[in-house]
Image: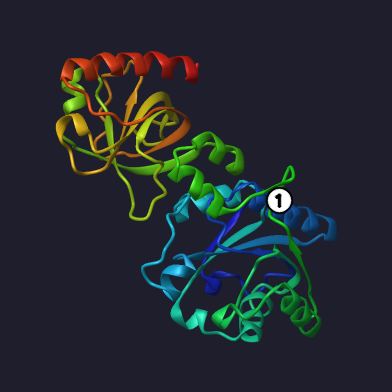
Amino acid sequence: MVRRWNGLDEVPAEWGRSVITIGVFDGVHRGHQRIVGTAVEEARRRGLRSVVITFDPHPDEVVRPGTHPPLLAGTGRRIELLEGLGADAVVVVPFTLELSKMAPDDFVQSVLVDRLHAAHVIVGEDFRFGHKAKGDVALLRELGDKYDFTAEGMPLVANDDTISSTYIRGRLEAGEVEAAARALGRPHRVEGVVVRGHQRGRALGFPTANLETPPQSAIPADGVYAGWLVCDSDRYPDFRWPAAISIGTNPTFEGVERTVEAYALDRDDLDLYGEHMAVDFTARTRDTLKFDSVEALVDQMHRDVDKIREITS
């Protein structure tokens, strides 16, 4: 069973030596999966346990407030994905201003050595740590000699393609959800709580779940998408339904607020208000358009649903 620790204080005092990987891991994309997978395999080879260290909030928000990049996965989703890679433990370290000002040596000693008893540390080759990001993989190796652990940096590469969270954000900003999915190794997901909107969809015959997404979520470009509406609650356990997803301001109705709405195909019997839901993006089917009439919009929505049904089948 995977152990989850919220902060280093929750690590048991008797915890033995570990193979550790450390990073923000936003999106837990294929490059991240390769690094974590290597750490898990190395731990098993050595007869040790593997630990993944990640941070919350995103370090950029603490070091340079207001520069927080759109998040590919919220903390809960990120932990869920990391746990699924086979690590023995995941520790979420609160990233604070005090932590950001630690000298690299102090960071290594307090985080990797004193608490988690590092035997081997695996990071991405661009990993930086310590005050003003002065520490790199070379310094990590030097400190490993000092504190009796080994370290290695791995390229963020999968199938000869360099993978990065920045690349994936760029694909999403362009609406290229299929390219983003290839880099992630799964469809991009956006989560939120279903709230009441203008209820126009229900009046038009396409009742939608209007998601109130967390701030700084990585939302794909405006458009209509094929995908899936996902929920796992007491009311709808393991609920996953093919969906038409619309992102935009509803220009036909002169809307100004950007929304994420999803219509579960052929379902008008769902009561989703207040539910925590997610949408997984499979393909972009068209731009967001302004129609001359409501009738023209409804005709297009029927065509959208037919196409999306074909894609998701």
Q: Position of residue 175 (x, y in %)?
A: 44, 38
State the image quarter where residue 42 is shown.
bottom right
State the residue lying farthest toward the right.
Answer: 45
> Does 104 sit left or right of 97 as displayed?
right
Residue 9: x, y in percent? 53, 74
Q: Residue at x 74, y 45 (%)?
A: 160
Residue at 37 percent across and 55 percent down: it is 216
**Residue at 66% across / 66% down in the picture?**
126
Q: What element carries label 1?
A: strand
In this orientation, which residue lies closer to the viewer: 307 or 151? 307
**24 sits left or right of 122 in the view:** left
Image coordinates of residue 261 in percent, x first then y, are: 30, 34
Q: Let me know if residue 267 appears in the view.
A: yes
Outermost residue toward the front? Answer: 292
Residue at mark 1 = 157
Work out whether 196 lies above or below 208. below
* 295 or 37: nearer the viewer: 295
Residue 56 lies left or right of residue 150; in this view the side is left
Q: How crowded is mark 1: few (under 14 residues within 10 Å), some or many (20 or more)?
A: some
Q: Is residue 91 above or below residue 276?
A: below
Q: In this view, does 39 lie above or below 230?
A: below
Nearer-the-camera pick, 192 or 61: 61
Coordinates of residue 155 in the picture (x, y in percent): 72, 57
Residue in the picture at 70% in, 60% down: 50
Left/right placement of residue 262 relative to residue 154 reads left
Q: Is residue 205 visible?
A: no
Q: Which amino acid does label 1 sit on?
A: Val
From the viewer's perspective, is residue 227 above or below residue 5? above
